[in-house]
Image: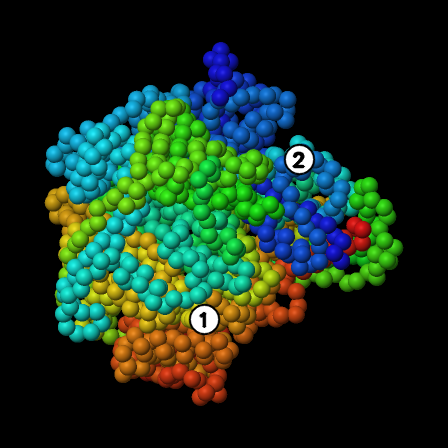
C-alpha cells in the first residue's frame, strides 16, 4: 500500500506536520511535506497526490482569527485547483487549524453552503481547552471514517491527472466493511481555543446533519451533544468534524494525529473501566490511526 | 520603505465586533474579572477589535479588507471610518492601545495579509502602517474613576499599553496620527570614567542601569586609565551586560569563606570555596563522571545521551523581574528565551517539551493590603499562565510538567521558571565558530524592546520599577520563533551537512552577549548599521544591547553562506550578515564606518574582578511565615484531610493544565493528569522518537518551606529534599535512576549579608551531597539573585508587610531520566480493588542520604519489574493526602490503617517515601522495605468509593475530589 501519495502542507506556524507525516507513514502512505508557498506557486503539484493534508497549528499566528491568513493565502491560487482535485476523486483532510482554514476558505461545508453559512470561533469557555473527547461517527459518506462499497469502487477508478489507469489488481479489490461505521464512538484529544462551530441559522445545522455532512459529533456517556466538557467548545449540534457533499473533503477539530499509538490514550495505564472505556491494547490500531488507515484503504488503488 | 506621498495618504480604522453578545466570549471573560474586582453592578462588557491603517487606501480598499480579511462573515460585524480617532458614539468606553515601539504581532500580520488581499484583487498598495487596539463598552459602570480602575486592573498594563476613556464627562483624546518612535541622531558618546571618584562611579553604575559593584567599576576605570582613553557608552554597556549576574553568575562563582553549621553532621566547620559553584555542583558532576553526560555546563543547555543516535538537551531559566512587571509578556518571553536556549544548544536541538513552575502569593490575597507597584497575585497567575500557554501552544511545544507554589513572601517577587527539553543528533552537539565565518543574525528585527534586561535582573524591585524598567519588558511573537526554528533545522540537517559552524541565542544582553560569547576566542567585527530594525531611529548602543526577541546568531562559513541564506529566504525568515569573526581577539563594533567600540575579548571574559566573600550560618528555628500549613486546630480528621487537599499547594492545577497543549507533537505518554478521573501525575513521560518505545521522564522538586521536626529551616536540607523529590517523581513513572540527570535553579534574595550567602553555600552543598549520594549528575543550571522588594515605611505600616520583602530561599531541581520502555510506565491512579497498598520508606538507621539512595533504587527496580500497579510519591500533603490523590485519580476507594504517628505524622511532609499498589502476592516478594498499610476498595453499589483511614477518616472520594478541585477551579481567588 506504499502507493498512496499524500501531500502535507506546511506554513509558518503549522506545528503538527511531524506527527501527521508519521501517521500517514504508519498507515502505509507516502507523505511529502511541502511549503504552502510552493504549492501556491505551482498548483499542478497536486496532480501527483491522492490526498492533501493541512495539519494543525497556529498558521501565521492566527492573528486575524484561526486559519484566516492561511485561508487567504490559499484562496486565490488554490481554491479552484483544490475543488478540481476533489472532483477528480482526490481527498482533502484538515485537522484543527487545517479544518479552520478549510472552513474559512469556503471548502467546508461546501456544496450549497457559502462562506457566510458556517464558521469556527472562540470556545464558550473563552480559553484554550486541552482534553480528550468522545466522538460519534455520524456519516457514511466520508472515506476517512469508513465508506460504502460503492465508494470503494468509485475510488478505485480514481486517477490522478496525467497518469495511466490504475492497476487492475487494485481496481478489483473486494469491498470490505467500513472500519468506522456510523454510530461508532472514537476517542481523540482536542487542543484549541477556537473550535466552536457556529452556523448562520439553526436550519443550516439541521441541513448539514440531514446531508450526512456532519461527520463527527461530540458526545457524552449518555449520547448528549451539548454538555461541557464532553462538548468542549459549545459547537452547535456538537459538531466536531464536517465533510463536503462528496465526503472527500474532511476536516475536524480533534487530533487523530495524537492518537496513533495506544500509549497516547490518557488512561492506557489503567486496568479498570474508565469513562473512556478500557485502555486500548496493543495490536488494534488506535482510534486516530484508523482514520489514516481508512483513507489509505480508500485511495490505495488510486495512484500507481 | 515605500515613498510616502502625503497627497494620497489616508488613515482609516476598522472596528470588528462579535455579531451578538452571545458570541462575545472575550467580553464575558472580562466581565468575570471586573466582577471579581468587586464591581458587581457591572452588567456586561462588549468587546471589539480595532485595526488602524495608514496608506494610499481608498474607501473601496478598506471595505474589501474589512469584508474579506478582518471580519468573520458569520460571527462578526464591522464598521469603518476615515481617521484614527472618531468612533461610533457610546458611553462607558475604554480603548486600549499598545505604546509606541511595543511589539504588535497582529498588526504586522494584518499589514502583510492586507497587502496580499489587495494585490490579489489587482490593487497593488503599499500600506504604510497598521496598528491594532481593543475597545470595550462597560455596561452599568457608574463613574469615570470606575472605568479607569477597570482599565488599570483588568484590561491594560501601563508599561506596554495606554488607554483612553470616554464616559461620565471624561473624554480622553485618541491621537489621530500614528505615534512615531523617537529619532536619535548619531553621536558617538564617551563616558569620562577616568575622572570619576568612587562615589561618582557608584552613582553612574546605578543611574546608568549598569548594576556593577564599586570594585567592578574601579576595574573598568583602571582598564581605561591604562589605555589612556575613556570608554564609549557602548563599551561600558557591553562590559555591564557581560559582567552582569545574569550572564556570569559572579556570586555563585566567587571565592567564599564559610563558617558555621556543618553539612549533614553535627558541629561547626570552617571551609573555603575557591569557586562555590565549581567546588559543589560542578564537582559533583565531575566526581560522578557518567559517560552518558555528553555536554555539561559549557553550552546553553546540558545534554545527556538518549540512544546511540540522539541526545536529550535540558535547560531551565527564570524570568522573574519581567514577569513581576508584565506577567503575560514576562512569562511568554521566558518560555521563548528558554526555547531559544535549546535551539542554541550545540548546532541546534529540536524542542520537544516545555515545563513551567511558578512561585506566587495566594490568589486570594487581600487586595487592600497590596503594596503600591505590586500586581495582585491573581492577576500575576492569570497573566503568567496565559503567557506560557500562548507561547508554548503557538510554538507547537507541549507543556508537560510543572508546579505552582504559593507563599506570601513571593507577593512582590513572583518567580517564573521555564524549562525546555530538546532532541539533538549526537553529531550536532558540538560547535565552534571559525575565524572568517560570517556573523549572521536571523529571525525577528531589532527594536527598542528589552533594553537592559540583563542588568535589570540585578536590581531590587521598588514601587518605581514599572516606570523605570518598562523598556526591559518584551512582547513575544511565537510564530516568528517557530519559523526561525523551522529554517534552522533545515539548515542543520541539510543534505550537504550543517550550513553553519556555530549558533547561539540572542537573549539577555542581545547582540553584545551573543557575539561576545561566540567570538570569545576569536574576536569579531560587527557593523551595526546592517542589523535589520523594526523602525528607524535606534541609536547604535540600543541596537547592540536590545533584547528584542526571536533572534539567533549564526557563524556561517563563507562557502556555505549562499546556501544558508537561500534556506532562510525560502522559509521567509530574515537573515542578515552583520560582520565576521576575527582572529586577533578584539571585538570591534562599528556604525556606518565609525568605530563605536573596541574591546579586548580577554577583558570581557576574564577581566571581571573575582570576589572573595564571607558566609555564615547557624541553625535556628523560626516560626513559619505563612500560616497555611497550620490546620492542627481542627481535631476532626475528615476535616483535616479535606483542608490538606484544599491547601493551594496540594490542590488540583487542572485549570492551568488544560490551558496548555500537552500533547502536540504526539510524544506525550504520561500526561500531567492521570487516571480515568484525572488525578495528579508525578512526572511527565515522552517518547522522543516515534519509531522507538524508549522514553524520557521529566519531573521537578521544590520545597522552599520544608522544616525538620524541630521546625528548623535549613537550606542544606531544603536542597536535599528538592533533589529527593525530583528523583522520586521520575522514579514513580518508571525512569531509570542510573540514567537520570538534574538541573539547579537557585532563586535567592540579595546575597549582601553573610547569612544569606551562608544559606546559598548550604543549599549548594546540600544539592551536591544529594547528587553524589543519589548518583545524579547536574548538567546545567541558572540562578536569579536579588529577588527583593523595598517599600516605604508608610506602605509597610499600611500593608502590614515588611519594608524589605525577600523571597524564601528557593531551589528548583528539575530531573530528566531515561525510561527504557514507556510501555512499562506506571501512573499514580489506583488500579484494582483487592490490591494492597505499601509504604516504602528509607531505613532510618543508616545515614539519611545513603538509606534514601538505596530506597530509590529498590523502588525503581520494583517498578521496573512490572509488579507495581500504581506509584505516588509522598509530598506536601503527607501520606493521607497521597492516598487520597490516588483515590481521586481512579475513582476507587481505599482502606488504610494509619495512626497519627505512623511514619512521622500522616498529614505532614514525609521525605523519601512512596505509596505503591500491588497484588498481595507481589507484596510478599517485594525487594524493598515495604510496610503494608491498606488495600484498594471497589466503589459501593451506589457508585461511591470511600477512603477510610483507621477509625479516624471515613469519607467519600467524591468529597475528597471536590475539596481538591475547587480551590483553583477558576484560577483561584473566589
Which residue lies under the disc numbered 1? B736
Q: Secondary structure at mark 1?
A: loop
Q: Secondary structure at mark 2?
A: helix
**What residue occupies the far top of the structure in this picture?**
B7
Coordinates of residue A51 in the picture (x, y in percent): 71, 48
Quarter assignment of residue B640: bottom left
Coordinates of residue B898 in the picture (x, y in percent): 32, 82
Q: Chain of mark 1?
A: B
At x 32%, y 65%, the residue is: B284
> Mark 2, residues whose alpha carbon is within 10 Å: few (<14), some, or many (≥20)?
some
Coordinates of residue B297 in the picture (x, y in percent): 37, 55
> Mark 1, residues whose alpha carbon is within 10 Å: few (<14), some, or many (≥20)?
many
Which residue lies under the disc numbered 2? A40
Label 2, label 1: how far apart the Cα atoms are: 49 Å
At x 55%, y 18%, the residue is: B58
**What residue occupies the far front of the structure in this picture?**
B584
Q: Residue B973, relative to residue B580: is it above or below?
A: below
Q: Residue A263, relative to residue B930: is it above or below?
A: above
Q: Which one is in front, B224 or B258?
A: B224
Quarter assignment of residue B681: bottom left
Image quarter of the C terminus of chain B: bottom left
Coordinates of residue B332 in the picture (x, y in percent): 40, 45
Quarter assignment of residue B781: bottom left
Q: Is residue B127 left or right of residue A171?
A: left
Q: Which one is in front, B893 or A39?
A: A39
Q: Chain of mark 2?
A: A
Residue B548 visible in this rendered orientation of the protein: no
Q: Is residue B795 left or right of residue B896?
A: left
Q: Is residue B768 left or right of residue B869?
A: left
The nearer-to-camera label among 2 and 1 is 1
Q: Which one is in front, B763 or A26?
A: B763
Amino acid at each position: 500500500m506504499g502507493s498512496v501519495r499524500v501531500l502535507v502542507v506546511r506554513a509558518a506556524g503549522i506545528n503538527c506536520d511531524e506527527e501527521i507525516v508519521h501517521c500517514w507513514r504508519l498507515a502505509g502512505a507516502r507523505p511529502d511535506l511541502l511549503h504552502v508557498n510552493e504549492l501556491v506557486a505551482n498548483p499542478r503539484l497536486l496532480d501527483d497526490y491522492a490526498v492533501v493534508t493541512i495539519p494543525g497549528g497556529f498558521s501565521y499566528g492566527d492573528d486575524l482569527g484561526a486559519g484566516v491568513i492561511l485561508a487567504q493565502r490559499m484562496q486565490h491560487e488554490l481554491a479552484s485547483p483544490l475543488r478540481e482535485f476533489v472532483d477528480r476523486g482526490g481527498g482533502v483532510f484538515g485537522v484543527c487549524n487545517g479544518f479552520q482554514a478549510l472552513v474559512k476558505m469556503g471548502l467546508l461545508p461546501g456544496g450549497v453552503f457559502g462562506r457566510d453559512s458556517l464558521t469556527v470561533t472562540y470556545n464558550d469557555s473563552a480559553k484554550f481547552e486541552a482534553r480528550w473527547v468522545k466522538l460519534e461517527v455520524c456519516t457514511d459518506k466520508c472515506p476517512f471514517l469508513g465508506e460504502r462499497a460503492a465508494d470503494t469502487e468509485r475510488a478505485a477508478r480514481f486517477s490522478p491527472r496525467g497518469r495511466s489507469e490504475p492497476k487492475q489488481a487494485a481496481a478489483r479489490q473486494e469491498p470490505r466493511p467500513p472500519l468506522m461505521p456510523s454510530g461508532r464512538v472514537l476517542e481523540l484529544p482536542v487542543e484549541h481555543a477556537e473550535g466552536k462551530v457556529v452556523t448562520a441559522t439553526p436550519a443550516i445545522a439541521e441541513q448539514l446533519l440531514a446531508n450526512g455532512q456532519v461527520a463527527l459529533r461530540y458526545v457524552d456517556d449518555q449520547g448528549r451533544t451539548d454538555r461541557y466538557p464532553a462538548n468542549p467548545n459549545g459547537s452547535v449540534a456538537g459538531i466536531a468534524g464536517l465533510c463536503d457533499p462528496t465526503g472527500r473533503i474532511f476536516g475536524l477539530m480533534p487530533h487523530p494525529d495524537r492518537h496513533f499509538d495506544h500509549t497516547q490514550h490518557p488512561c492506557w495505564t489503567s486496568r479498570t473501566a474508565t469513562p473512556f472505556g478500557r485502555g486500548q491494547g496493543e495490536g488494534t490500531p488506535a482510534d486516530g490511526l484508523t482514520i489514516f488507515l481508512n483513507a489509505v484503504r480508500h485511495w490505495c488503488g488510486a495512484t500507481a | 520603505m515605500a515613498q510616502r506621498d502625503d497627497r494620497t495618504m489616508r488613515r482609516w480604522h476598522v472596528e470588528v465586533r462579535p455579531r451578538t453578545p452571545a458570541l462575545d466570549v472575550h467580553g464575558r471573560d472580562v466581565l468575570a474579572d471586573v466582577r471579581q474586582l468587586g464591581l458587581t453592578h457591572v452588567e456586561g462588557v462588549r468587546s471589539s477589535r480595532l485595526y488602524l491603517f495608514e496608506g494610499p487606501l481608498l474607501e473601496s480598499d478598506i471595505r474589501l479588507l474589512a469584508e474579506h480579511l478582518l471580519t468573520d462573515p458569520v460571527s462578526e460585524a464591522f464598521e469603518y471610518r476615515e481617521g484614527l480617532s472618531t468612533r461610533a458614539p457610546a458611553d462607558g468606553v475604554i480603548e486600549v492601545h499598545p505604546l509606541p515601539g511595543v511589539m504588535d504581532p497582529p498588526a504586522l500580520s494584518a499589514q502583510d495579509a492586507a497587502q496580499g488581499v489587495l494585490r490579489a484583487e489587482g490593487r497593488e498598495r503599499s500600506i504604510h502602517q497598521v496598528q491594532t487596539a481593543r475597545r470595550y463598552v462597560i455596561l452599568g459602570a457608574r463613574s469615570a474613576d470606575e472605568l479607569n480602575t477597570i482599565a488599570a486592573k483588568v484590561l491594560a498594563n501601563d508599561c506596554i499599553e495606554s488607554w483612553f476613556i470616554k464616559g461620565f464627562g471624561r473624554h480622553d483624546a485618541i491621537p489621530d496620527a500614528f505615534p512615531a518612535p523617537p529619532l536619535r541622531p548619531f553621536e558617538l558618546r564617551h563616558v569620562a570614567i577616568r575622572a570619576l571618584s568612587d562615589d561618582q562611579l557608584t552613582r553612574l553604575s546605578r543611574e546608568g542601569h549598569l548594576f556593577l559593584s564599586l570594585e567592578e567599576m574601579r576595574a573598568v576605570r583602571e582598564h581605561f586609565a591604562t589605555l589612556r582613553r575613556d570608554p564609549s557608552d557602548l563599551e561600558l554597556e557591553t562590559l555591564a551586560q557581560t559582567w552582569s549576574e545574569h550572564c556570569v553568575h559572579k556570586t555563585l562563582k566567587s571565592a567564599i569563606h564559610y563558617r558555621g553549621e556543618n553539612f549533614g553532621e553535627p558541629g561547626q566547620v570552617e571551609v573555603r570555596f575557591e569557586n562555590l559553584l565549581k567546588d559543589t555542583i560542578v564537582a559533583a558532576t565531575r566526581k560522578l563522571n557518567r559517560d552518558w553526560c555528553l555536554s555539561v555546563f559549557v553550552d546553553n543547555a546540558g545534554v545527556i545521551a538518549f540512544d546511540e543516535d540522539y541526545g536529550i538537551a535540558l535547560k531551565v531559566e527564570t524570568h522573574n523581574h519581567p514577569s513581576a512587571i508584565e506577567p503575560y509578556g514576562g512569562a511568554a518571553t521566558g518560555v521563548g528565551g528558554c526555547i531559544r536556549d535549546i535551539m542554541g544548544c550545540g548546532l541546534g536541538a529540536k524542542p520537544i517539551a516545555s515545563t513551567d513552575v511558578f512561585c506566587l502569593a495566594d490568589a486570594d490575597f487581600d487586595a487592600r493590603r497590596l503594596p503600591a507597584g505590586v500586581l495582585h497575585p491573581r492577576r500575576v497567575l492569570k497573566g503568567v499562565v496565559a503567557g506560557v500557554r500562548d507561547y508554548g501552544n503557538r510554538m507547537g511545544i507541549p507543556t508537560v510538567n510543572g508546579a505552582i507554589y504559593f507563599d506570601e513572601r513571593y507577593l512582590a517577587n513572583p518567580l517564573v521558571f521555564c524549562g525546555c527539553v530538546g532532541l539533538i543528533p549526537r553529531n550536532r552537539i558540538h560547535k565552534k565558530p571559525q575565524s572568517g565565518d560570517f556573523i549572521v543574525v536571523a529571525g525577528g528585527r531589532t527594536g527598542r524592546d528589552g533594553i537592559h534586561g540583563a542588568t535589570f535582573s540585578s536590581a531590587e524591585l521598588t514601587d518605581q520599577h514599572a516606570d523605570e524598567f518598562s523598556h526591559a519588558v518584551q512582547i513575544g511573537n511565537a510564530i516568528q520563533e517557530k519559523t526561525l526554528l523551522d529554517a534552522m533545522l533545515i539548515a542543520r540537517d541539510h543534505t550537504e551537512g550543517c550550513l553553519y559552524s556555530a549558533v547561539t541565542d540572542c537573549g539577555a544582553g542581545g547582540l553584545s552577549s551573543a557575539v561576545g560569547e561566540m567570538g570569545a576566542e576569536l574576536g569579531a567585527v560587527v557593523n551595526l548599521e546592517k542589523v535589520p530594525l523594526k523602525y528607524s531611529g535606534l541609536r547604535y548602543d540600543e541596537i547592540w544591547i536590545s533584547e528584542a526577541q526571536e533572534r539567533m546568531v549564526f557563524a556561517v562559513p563563507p562557502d556555505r553562506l549562499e546556501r544558508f541564506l537561500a534556506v532562510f529566504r525560502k522559509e521567509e525568515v530574515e537573515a542578515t550578515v552583520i560582520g565576521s569573526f576575527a582572529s586577533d581577539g578584539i571585538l570591534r563594533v562599528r556604525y556606518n564606518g565609525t568605530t563605536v567600540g573596541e574591546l579586548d575579548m580577554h577583558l570581557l571574559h576574564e577581566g571581571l574582578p573575582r570576589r572573595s566573600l564571607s558566609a555564615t550560618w547557624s541553625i535556628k528555628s523560626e516560626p513559619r511565615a505563612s500560616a497555611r500549613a497550620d490546620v492542627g486546630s481542627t481535631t476532626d480528621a475528615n476535616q483535616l484531610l479535606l483542608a490538606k487537599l484544599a491547601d493551594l499547594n496540594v490542590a488540583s492545577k487542572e485549570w492551568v493544565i488544560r490551558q496548555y497543549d500537552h500533547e502536540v507533537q504526539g510524544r506525550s505518554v504520561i500526561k500531567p493528569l492521570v487516571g480515568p478521573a484525572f488525578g495528579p501525575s508525578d512526572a511527565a513521560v515522552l517518547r522522543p522518537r516515534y519509531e522507538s518505545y524508549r522514553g524520557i521522564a521529566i519531573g521537578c522538586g521544590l520545597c522552599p518551606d520544608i522544616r525538620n521536626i524541630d521546625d528548623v529551616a535549613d537550606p542544606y536540607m531544603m536542597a536535599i529534599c528538592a533533589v529527593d523529590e525530583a528523583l522520586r517523581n521520575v522514579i514513580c513513572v518508571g525512569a531509570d535512576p542510573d540514567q537520570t540527570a538534574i538541573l539547579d535553579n537557585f532563586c535567592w534574595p540579595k546575597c549582601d549579608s553573610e547569612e544569606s550567602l551562608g544559606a546559598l553555600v548550604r543549599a549548594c552543598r546540600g544539592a551536591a551531597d544529594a547528587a553524589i549520594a543519589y548518583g545524579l549528575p547536574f548538567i546545567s543550571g541558572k540562578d536569579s539573585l536579588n529577588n527583593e522588594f523595598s517599600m516605604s515605611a508608610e506602605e509597610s505600616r499600611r500593608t502590614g508587610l515588611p519594608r524589605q520583602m525577600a523571597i524564601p530561599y528557593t531551589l528548583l531541581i528539575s530531573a530528566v531520566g531515561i525510561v527504557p520502555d514507556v510501555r512499562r510506565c506506571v501512573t499514580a491512579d489506583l488500579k484494582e480493588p483487592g490490591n494492597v497498598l505499601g509504604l516504602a520508606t528509607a531505613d532510618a538507621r543508616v545515614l539519611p542520604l545513603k538509606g534514601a539512595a538505596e530506597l530509590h533504587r529498590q523502588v525503581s527496580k520494583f517498578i521496573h519489574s512490572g509488579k507495581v500497579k500504581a506509584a505516588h510519591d509522598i509530598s506536601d500533603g503527607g501520606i493521607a493526602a497521597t492516598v487520597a490523590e490516588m483515590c481521586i485519580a481512579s475513582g476507587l476507594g481505599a482502606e488504610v490503617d494509619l495512626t497519627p504517628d505512623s511514619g512521622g505524622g500522616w498529614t505532614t511532609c514525609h521525605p523519601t517515601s512512596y505509596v505503591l499498589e500491588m497484588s498481595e502476592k507481589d507484596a510478599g516478594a517485594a525487594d524493598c522495605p515495604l510496610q503494608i498499610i491498606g488495600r484498594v476498595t471497589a466503589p459501593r453499589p451506589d457508585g461511591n468509593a470511600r477512603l477510610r483511614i483507621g477509625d479516624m477518616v471515613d469519607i467519600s472520594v467524591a468529597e475528597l475530589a471536590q475539596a481538591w478541585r475547587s480551590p483553583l477551579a477558576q484560577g483561584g481567588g473566589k
